[in-house]
Amino acid sequence: MANEDTDLRLLVRQLRWEADGVLSVLLENADGAELPAWTPGAHIDLTLPGGLVRQYSLCGSLDDRRTWRLGVLREPDGRGGSAAVHDRLRAGMVLEACGPRNNFALGDAQRYVFIAGGIGITPILAMVREAERRGADWTLLYGGRCRESMAFVEELRGHEGKVTLHPEAEHGLLPLVDLLATPVPGALVYCCGPERLIGAVSDAMASWPPGSLHIERFRPVAPAAEMEDSDHEFEVEAAGSGVRVRVPVGTTVVRALESVGVYPATSCEEGICGTCETKVLDGVPDHRDSLLSPEEQQAGNSMMICVSRCRGPRLVLDI
Ligand code: FES
C-alpha cells in the first residue's frame, strides 16, 4: 500500500451539481501552493464542517496540481458526512485535510475490467484515464439507480466502445455473470460501489486467479464496534519504546496504546482508510478491517490497529 500523508489546509473553490444528489467539490491549497501529486485510486481525509472526518476519492485530473475534485453523494441514511457536505459546505471555506493516500492503486496489467456502482465511479474515473494513457485494453461497466443519478457520464464520452452505462431503472441489475464468468488472462478487475455490488462481483469471480480483484469499500464490512465470540484480552508491545499494554475485550489496540502515551495516526477508526496500518513484528493479527486483501491478511505483515485484534496472547508492533 502506498501511504503518503501530508497535512493540508484546503480552500473550497466551488461546489457543482454533477447528477441527482451528487455534488463535486473543487479544492485548492489554501496557501496557493501546488497540491501534492497523487495516483489514481487515491483518497484524502477531509475534516468537514462540524468536525466529522471522511474519506473521499480524488477524481479530477492528475496533471492539475492546482485543483482537486471530489464527488459526494447525498446519502439520506448516511452517518452525517454527506449531509455536512451538501448542507453546510460553502465556497470560500477552508478545511483541514490529510493525504493523499492510496489503498486502491492501479497495478500493472495488459487488460483492466473496471466496475463502478453509483458514486463508486469517482476513483474509477481516474483509473480509466490512466489505463488509456498506458495504452492498455480496458472496459468499464458503470451502473446506477437511474441515468439522472449517474455522475461524470459526460467525461466518459469518446470511449463508447469501452464504456457500458447501465442504469438499473432501464436495464435491471448489472450483467456481472456474463462479464466475469470466464477469467480473462492477464486482466485485473477494479470495483468500487455499494456492498451488494462488491459481493456480487466477488461471487462472480470465484474461478479467477487470486489477486485478480481489487475493491474499495465506502463502509466497513461489519460495524467496527462489533465484538466476536473469539475476542480475548492480549498484550501489545510498541517496539519503538518497548512500552507494553494489555488490550481488554471491548477496547481497541489504538485506545490501549493511547492510554500509555503512544498515539498512532488514525482517521476512520472503522478499518477502511488505512491510516493506522501498522507493521506486525511478532504475533498473529486477527484482522477485522475491510481493506487488506485476503492474501495480505493471510500474510499478517501489517494490520489496522483501529479494529483488528490478536489471535494469540501477544503482538509486537512497529510503532
Ligand atoms: Fe482508518 Fe484504522 S483509522 S483503517
Image: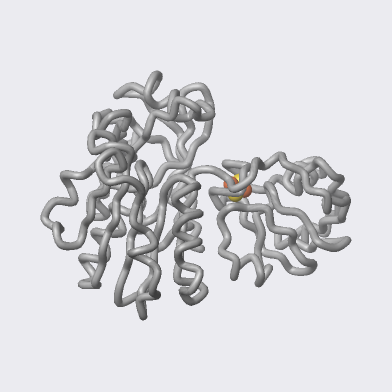
Residue 260 appears left or right of 288: right
Check the image and report above or below for 227 versus 285: above
Residue at 46 percent of width and 74 percent of height:
208
Q: Is residue 261 visible?
A: no
Question: Picture coordinates of residue 183 (x, y %)?
Answer: 40, 75
- Which of the 4 quarters of the picture holds residue 172? top left
Residue found farthest to the left: 158
Can residue 219 be seen from the camera position used here? yes
| Residue at the image position 81 percent from the left and 41 percent from the top | 250
Toward which corner of the image does residue 105 lie, by quadrant?
bottom left
Q: Quadrant of the C terminus?
A: bottom right
292 on left or right of 99: right
Q: Nearer the viewer, residue 206 or 316?
A: 206
Q: Residue at x 56, y 48 (%)?
A: 272
From the viewer's perspective, is residue 131 above or below residue 85? below
Query: Residue 155: x, y in percent?
Result: 18, 47
